[in-house]
Image (spheres, helix red, strand yellow):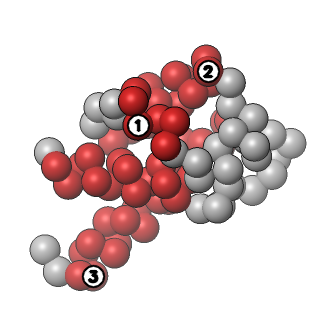
Amino acid sequence: MELVDTVKGRDGVLHDTIEVLRPFRRDGQPITPETDLTKDLNLDSLAVMDLMMALEERFDVSIPLNVVPELRTVADLADKISAIKGES
C-alpha cells in the first residue's frame, strides 16, 4: 500500500465518520475533525451506543466498548476505526 492510498484511506474514513455523525449533531452545527463528541454533540450513553452500532455497520468493524471513553474528537474516532480496519 502506498502512502497516497493510506492518506486517501484515512481521509475516506474521516469523511464517512462525519457522515454517520450528521444525525447526531445539534442545532445544525458543522462537524469537523476537531468536534468534541461529548461537549459539541452532547452524546448521552444511549446515543453513543447508537453511534457505535451505526459506525460498526458502516465500516464492517467491531469497536471495543472499552476504547470508547478514550475517543474525544471525531478525528480520534476516525483514527481508531482506521486502526481497527488495518488490523482486520
Query: What type is the residue that disc 2 sits on?
Result: Ser
**What residue is shown with label 3?**
4
Tally of numbered tags: 3
Q: Amino acid at mark 3?
A: Val
The answer to whether 78 appears left or right of 64 in the picture is: right
Please rate how many residues cluster around mark 3, counting C-alpha atoms within 10 Å: few if below 14, some from 14 to 19, many from 20.
Answer: few
Image quarter (top left, top right, bottom left or bottom right) of the N terminus: bottom left
* Residue at 37% from the left image edge and 65% from the top image edge: 10
Instruction: Report how far apart the C-alphas of labels 1 and 3 lie in the structure.
Output: 28 Å
Q: Tell me whether the residue at label 1 lies in contact with that at label 3, contact meaning CB atoms closer than 8 angstroms.
A: no
Disc 1, SS = helix
Label whose residue precedes the other's in the sequence (1 or 2): 2
- What is the x, y in percent for residue 33? 59, 62
Residue 50: image location, x then y, percent = 54, 23
User: Along the polypeptide, which appears first: circle 1 or circle 3?
Assistant: 3
Q: Secondary structure at mark 3?
A: helix
Quarter of image, res 56: top left
Q: Which residue is mark 1?
A: 67
> Eyeballing the image, is 22 above or below 1?
above
Q: CA distance from mark 1 to mark 2?
A: 14 Å
Q: Which residue is mark 2?
A: 45
